[in-house]
Amino acid sequence: MNAIIEKSEKSCAAAETLEPAGVTLKVERVTQVPDAALIRCEGYIDTYNAAAFQHRVQTVVEDGARHLVLELSKTSYISSSGVGAVVNLLKEARRRGGNMVLVRPTARVLEVFDLLGLLSFFDRADSVAEALRFFSQSATQPEIPYDAMQAITDAFKRLEHMVDREKLSGFYEQVVGLLKLIERLKPSLSARR
């Protein structure tokens, strides 16, 4: 596997610790698949560092990586803000004709994606090699069923009404933000129907 992955001077020659603390990213270009990058994430992605995480990975995409392998086996936690950042990166990768594969996400990370109803939108793999096969096997991206997107929207709207805005203002803002993101994605899905 090391023969197909090279550290990219442009992307990140060594591990980069983001501020605020909590997450370390190791970014490597993948030579086996054109325009691919491996991002190994250690620590946690929460409200305080999600924007920095998204910005860092976005620079990798802007440097030409449209296929993203996000290795999460050492990611102890991800908040809804972190999931929002990952969803935004997936959307950008797909806009550029690529995709994202999650590799070995921890049970806690999977639980958050599942609770938010977003797990089915991501390809997952048990190894980096398996993830790379997703990119070489198919140039087309999996279709996201419109009905599934509508069900997720409805669930978020119910959650929005259940959250105490004053006591949980940060969480409420994240729910509303994810609702807005889903609403922005829906027109492209309805065109596929």
Image (cartoon, helix red, strand yellow):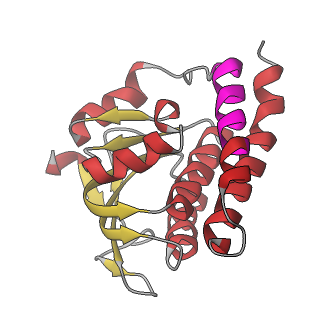
Q: Above or below — where is 63 with respect to 170?
A: above
Which range is magenta?
Answer: 145-157
Image quarter of residue 146:
top right
Q: Quadrant of the N terminus?
A: top left
Q: Main secondary structure of the magenta part?
A: helix
Residue 19 on image: x %, y %: 45, 87
Which residue is at 53% across, 44% downward? 116
Residue 171 on image: x %, y %: 61, 66
Which residue is at 57% across, 59% downward? 85
Residue 172 on image: x %, y %: 68, 64
Which residue is at 64% across, 34% downward? 152
Return the residue found at the far bottom: 20
Which residue is at 63% across, 23% downward? 148
Q: Nearer the viewer, residue 30 or 95?
A: 95
Q: Nearer the viewer, residue 42 or 176?
A: 176
Q: Quadrant of the C terminus?
A: top right
Q: Nearer the viewer, residue 15 or 2?
A: 15
Q: How many marks?
A: 0
Horizontally, residue 53 falls left or right of residue 152, namely left
Q: Above or below — where is 136 with respect to 30?
A: above
